[in-house]
Every structure is written in structure tokens, then in C-alpha cells.
Image: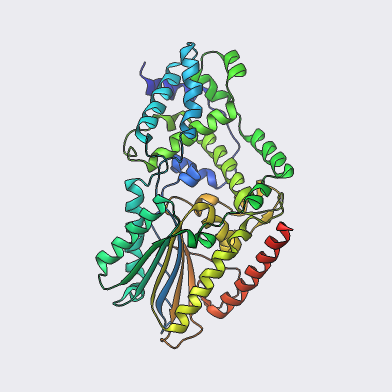
Amino acid sequence: MKIKQLLLLLLASCALPLALAAQSAFSFVEQDRNFVAGTYGIYPEKDLPQLTPAPQGYEPFYISHYGRHGSRYLNDMKGYMEPYKTLHQADSLGMLTDLGKMALREIRLYIADAEGRWGDLAEKGKVQQRRIAHRMLQNFPEVFSDGAFVDARSTIVTRCVLSMGSSVLQLVKERPNLKVSMNNSYSDMWYMNRQDKSLRAAASTQSSQKVFASFLEKRWNQDRLMTLLFNDMDYVRQHVDKVWFVYYLMKAALTQQNTDRSDEPNPLLHLFTSEDSYLYWLVENAWSYIHSGFCELNGAKQPYLQVYLLRKMIDEADSVINSQQHGASLRFGHETVLLPLVCLMGINGYDLRTDKFEELEQKGWWANRVYPMAGNLQIVFYRKNASDRNPLLKVLVNEKEATLPLPSDLAPYYRWSDFRNFYLRKVAEGESVLSATKR
């Protein structure tokens, strides 16, 4: 019997039912198994909505942007080696089924393709950045009219530098009279990708670890998959760490959509049912909330690290507004900045504070909607004329209009004075929290 036929038969006979009423993420999983890829999700550029026209008399003149690098390979071998070592050892002892041997062959192909390219920007990642830049030009042509500036900066990581280059090359190709500068320097890292080891370590408190472990245990039963891949369950019980083996196996399968092998068949994905994938999404979403959200299990502090970036964005916007310039500040970095920045700003309700992971899905805290490969935040400014000192703005997350925790009679547009005052208070609040954390 062919592998595909065997797989379908086993899935049909072994699949476990799951009560999923009123759990809306599951419908996305059924439509596209790659939906659950989280940080390895592909940029969602299909069916982007029409943008709300600006109020009469207003034109865009400035964009303040922070974007994640485009699609990349895994950062290191661990994501592949964890399942590879488990499968290879079992195979050497005759403990794999035909499907298990298929999984081992696939992992070997993944490793061969990624060798020497760990963390590299894939060609797909360059294309994503070019397309985003093209749509930015289409949506806001006034921002990029002749003589406009483009101040592009990236972190020092190569995939971010290349993402910046891909975006800027597209802009210059379509608007050759732009005044462009590009920089990647340690001197910008204090706000582009600020690190705080003590704050990062504080994310994993005993309380958060305990609640997460309980959440994981209730939602991560992988016995069905063990029977698909191994022919001896006693061996599995003694030698296989089911939780991490399955986690990395699914992660390995999901990363392939980002690589240069993305157009090839991906049989590993078919090992997992929609229920498996949905449970993986729940667990990944909770993990992202612990490390990027206002999680009350660890003091609700993680997003405050982005106050330096937010203040920088406000200061640079002030400078552009007061100088009567037009153009764009483009910043290329990482999901570990983008998601907590969105949380800090309370965009689309991502400033949610809770100690219950079960609330995240229901209340719309879906990390994968914010930080796919090439995910980005754009703050677009509009003014009546060059002397306008209180322009309007709107916020786009992955090119979709977003809401802010601010009053506005023009939503999705907001007044700069309201935005500036509110977020300067938020910055001061965050600086106070960070200062207290260090004491």
C-alpha cells in the first residue's frame, strides 16, 4: 500500500474527536493547515481589504514603520535535529512504521536544504518585502512623491539587512527621485531590538510555568501520532519525549512554506489532523502571550521593553511634522519586537491582561495575526497642508486598518495630539516599570 493511502486510512481510523464549538480559530485551521505556523506563518497578502478614504482635504505625507524580516530558514539545526535524532535512533532498532520511515526521509531532506543557510532570508522573504513596498507606494503615493526622504534602518542581523534592501530597491525602482538612506548599526540597536536579560528571564516565573504546563498537558495528547510513526509503544514510553518530539516535528513541517522547497509536496503536514494543528496553535499562542503580552502570571511587564522604540517613533514623527517634510521611516527587525510593540500600544485590544490562557482565543489575542514573516506596523500620517501641526493618522497592522485605545470621531483616523499625549504617558509608565524592575 502506498504511503499516502496508508496515511489516510490510519488518520481516518485513529483520529480523536474534539469538541470545538464556538472556537473560531479552528475554522481557519480547517481551511489552511499552515494557519497555525505562528512565527513561521507566511505573510497574509491575499484579499487585503480596501482602505478607508481620508477625510476630505487630507493627504498622506509620512509613514512610520516597523517590520519583521521576510520568510527565513530555521535559525539553527535544533528544530530539525530533535525529531531527526528520535526517528534515526528508532529506525536503527527497527521501531519505525512505514510512515515513521517517511518522516525520517523528509527530515533528512529538510536538513540538506537548510545546511549552511540557518536563519537566512529565503527568496520568498525578498519577494514579500518588495510587494509590501509596492503596495505602500500604491496606497500612499503622496508620501513618496519626488524629493521625499526614505530613512531605512535595520538591525544588524543579515536577514533584516536584506529585507531592508529588498524593500528600498523596490521603492527606488518605482520612484527613482527619492532621497534614500540605509543604515544598519549597533548604534540603533538600543531601540530597534533592545535586549534585557533580566526582563526576559522574568517572563518564565514559577507561576507562569506551572499554569502553562497544565495548559499544555490538557491539550497535547500525542498518542495517536505515536501509533502512526512507531511500531512499539513500550519503546515510545521508555525512549521518546512525546511532547517535544511532536512539537519540533510539527514545527519542522510548518517551516517548509518559507523555504525554497515551499512548492514541493510536504507529506509531514498530513501526519497531523486539524485537531492536532488547532491544539498546537493554542499552545503556541499561550507561549507567545507569556513572552510578549501583558500576562498577569509574570507581572505583565514584557511589552514595556518597547517604550524606547515607541518614544523614538514619536520623536521622529514630531521632527517630520515640524519640518514640513514628506517621506517614510522604515525599520526592519524582528517578531520579538513587533508583537510586544503592538501589545504596548493596545492595538486591536492586544493590551489584554489576563492570567487565563483560555481567554486568549475568545478575546482575539491571536499572535499569528501580528507577527507572520514580513509582519509590519505602519502609522500613516495625513495633513491638510504643510503647516498643519496636528495631523491625522491611522494604524495598519499587516496592511489592515487597526483600532487604538483612543477616542476618535473619525476612526480609523486619530488626531496626532491625542495619540502623542496618550503614548507619551504610556512611555513614561513603561520607563517607571522598567526602572523599578532593575532595583
68, above or below 248, in the image: below
Q: Quadrant of the C terminus?
A: bottom right
Q: Quadrant of the N terminus?
A: top left
Q: Front-most of 186 and 437?
A: 186
Q: In the picture, residue 31 is in which quadrant? A: top left
Asked whether residue 28 appears in the rendered view, the answer is no
Asked whether residue 161 appears in the rendered view, the answer is yes
Q: Residue at x 39, y 38 (%)?
A: 256
Count all numbered tags in the image, as a single digit: 0
Q: Residue at x 32, y 35 (%)?
A: 264
In the displayed orientation, state which residue is furthest to the bottom. 387
354, above or below 433, in the image: above
Residue 190, percent from left and from top: 54, 61
Left or right of 233 in this view: 358: right
54, above or below 14, in the image: below
Q: In the picture, residue 280 is in which quadrant? A: top right
Q: Residue at x 52, y 37 (%)?
A: 277
Question: What's the coloring here?
Answer: rainbow
Residue 46, percent from left and from top: 37, 54
Residue 19, percent from left and from top: 61, 37
Residue 311, percent from left and from top: 56, 69
Q: Front-most of 25 and 437?
A: 437
Left or right of 62 in this view: 192: right
Q: Residue at x 50, y 78 (%)?
A: 318
Left or right of 100 in this view: 2: left
